[in-house]
Amino acid sequence: EQLAERLSALEAQLADVGSAKESIEQLIARIDDDSRRLLGETIETVRGHFRELFERVFGGGQADIVLEPGVDLLETSVEIVARPPGKEPRSISLLSGGEKTMTCVALLLAIFRSRPSPFCVLDEVDAALDEANVDRFVGVLRDFLSSTQFIVVTHSKKTMAAATTLYGVTMEESGVSKRVSVRFESAATSRAKAA
């Protein structure tokens, strides 16, 4: 009789575990479906913005976000393919330093356009750019100033000239750093008053 009760209790527990397993599997399937849908929508949105911004930063050309065909969206690899004006389409890894930078800037800003963020820190992203590309880079950043504040670490005078506020660190004597800041609107007003 004790064995029968024990067997009955174990069978009830087994049924509960089976039911819980089924519920969890259904929940995972729903989450996976939602994740696939949201990821697919996001990739398509970012893809559209990326294509547009790539053309803007390069003054032409084409770019795309390519997913591995025939693979579950949640497990696929993602490749960035770019064709700067006058060149063949290539994986981003085969581009020059400046082309990689501009492609990555276009991709980053495409993501920002899809999911705006109040600020973005860019650390010397313009280091590999020539003057013409620095101008394009700065121009594209200006398009985002209504929704995103950029903190850009740079050595480029052209990038610095585009800033509204400039913070710098100098070393006037060995081992002693000094912070300086200039608000360009205030500096322009001060110069106008002095004249």
Image (cartoon, rainbow, N blue to C red):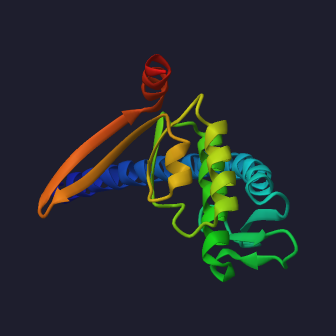
> Residue 14 location, x and y as percent?
35, 56
Q: Residue furthest left?
A: 175
Identified at 64% across, 40% down, the residue is 113
Q: Residue furthest right?
A: 86
Q: Is residue 25 left or right of residue 55?
A: left
Identified at 42% across, 22% down, the residue is 190
Total residue callouts: 0
Q: Does residue 70 appear in this view?
A: yes
Q: Is residue 128 left or right of residue 50?
A: left
> Who is closer to the viewer here, 67 or 100?
100
Identified at 60% across, 66% down, the residue is 129
Task: From this view, report whether residue 121 is shown above or below residue 63.
Answer: above
Q: Is residue 147 left or right of residue 58?
A: left
Q: Is residue 123 left or right of residue 115?
A: left
Identified at 85% across, 59% down, the residue is 60
Q: Does residue 78 appear in this view?
A: no
Q: Residue furthest front?
A: 195
> Who is closer to the viewer here, 16 or 115?
115
Q: Which image quadrant: the N terminus?
A: bottom left
Q: Residue furthest top?
A: 193
> Who is closer to the viewer here, 1 or 93?
93
> Residue 87 location, x and y as percent?
84, 77
> Residue 150 location, x and y as percent?
49, 41
